[in-house]
Amino acid sequence: MAPGSFSPPSTDRTEQEEGSVLRPRFDANGLITAVATDHATGELLMVAHMNAEALDRTIATGLAHYWSRSRRALWKKGESSGALQVVRELRVDCDQDAVWLRVDCRRRDDTCHTGRTTCFYRVVQPEDRTLEGGAAPGAHTASTA
Amino acid sequence: MAPGSFSPPSTDRTEQEEGSVLRPRFDANGLITAVATDHATGELLMVAHMNAEALDRTIATGLAHYWSRSRRALWKKGESSGALQVVRELRVDCDQDAVWLRVDCRRRDDTCHTGRTTCFYRVVQPEDRTLEGGAAPGAHTASTA
C-alpha cells in the first residue's frame, strides 16, 4: 500500500464499527477530525484535521501531523515552534471519521499559537454568553506572532 | 437576539481570539466541531457537530444538543437512550470553530450508539495499522439496534 493510502470505508456497518481494519472515513474535503489531549493530564489541547498523508505520517513517525486548512499544507505540529507532539496512543471512533491522539508535548506552553497550553482557554458563561479567559485588551501580542 | 443567532466571526484576529464575545465560526455547512469529555475522568467521549440552534439549545438548557449530519436533524443527546449529557463547562477554542463540552453523563454506558462508554474504543496499532478493541466477530449486536 502506498504511503498515505488506506482501505476505504466499509459499506458494512459492523465491519466499519467493529473491524480490525483501519478504514478512515475522510470527508468531501479529504479530511478527518483529529483531537489531541495531554497524555498525562487528559486536558484537551486542540482540535485539528488530517488528510490521508497527515494520518500516514503520524502513524509512521509517532509525531502528530495535521493538515492546515488555512495554509493548505501538511503541518508537522511544532516543526517551527518546537512544540512537537509525541503520540502515545492513537484511537479511532466508531464510524472512523475522527481520531483521538493522546500525546506528550514538547514545549507544552506553545501548544496554541497564542502562546498557551491549550487552544481552549475561554469559558462560555451561560448566563450572558460572554467568554472569560481571553487576554485583557492590549495585553495580548502573541496572536500576531 | 433571536434564539440560535450569534455574533458573526470578527475580521479582527485579536478580537476573535481574545475577545469576550462568543463569535462561533460555523463552516460552509453551518457547523462547528463539538468535543465532549467526561467531567470527572477527562476521557474523550465523542466528537460531533453543532449548528447554531444546537449551540443555542446547549447553552440555554445545559444539556448537550448536536446536529446529526446523518439524520439532518437537531439531536438532543440521550433523548431516546437516556444518555443525557449535563454540561458542566463549555469552552471555545482560539478561532472559535470548535467547542469543548465537559459533561456529566446520565447512563454513561450508552454514550456510544454501539453500547460503550466512549466512541473511541479502538486503538490503532502503529506496527501493522490494525485496530484493537472492537468486538469479536459475531459478538456484537448493538450496532444495528
Image (cartoon, coloured by chain):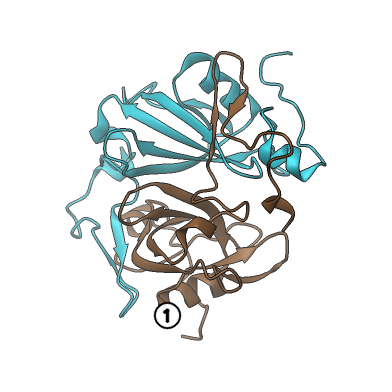
Chain colours: A cyan, B brown
Say few, some or many: other residues with alpha carbon within 10 Å of mark 1 (under 14 / 14 to 19 / 20 or more).
Answer: some
Between residue B139 and residue A22, name the one nearer to us: B139
Residue topped by disc 1: B60
Image quarter where the N terminus of chain A lies is top right
Would you say residue B130 is visible in this rendering? yes
Q: Quadrant of residue A78?
A: top left
Secondary structure of residue under mark 1: helix
Q: Position of residue A138 (x, y in %)?
A: 19, 55
Vertical comparison of A80 with B90: above or below: above
- Residue pictured at 43% horizontal, 65% vertical: B23
Would you say residue B33 is visible in this rendering? no
The residue at the far right in this view is A11
Q: Position of residue A12 (x, y in %)?
A: 81, 41
Q: Is residue B76 left or right of residue B93?
A: right
Q: Amino acid at mark 1?
A: Ala
Between residue A127 and residue A13, name the one nearer to us: A13
Q: Position of residue B121 (x, y in %)?
A: 53, 40
Image quarter where the C terminus of chain A lies is top left
Q: Is residue A21 left or right of residue A82?
A: right
- Residue pictured at 39% horizontal, 21% vertical: A79
Chain letter behind tag 1: B
Between residue A75 and residue A98, name the one nearer to us: A98
Q: Is residue B130 left or right of residue B4?
A: right
The residue at the far bottom in this view is B2
Between residue B16 and residue A130, name the one nearer to us: A130
- Residue pictured at 51% horizontal, 51% vertical: B46
Q: Position of residue B58 (x, y in %)?
A: 46, 73
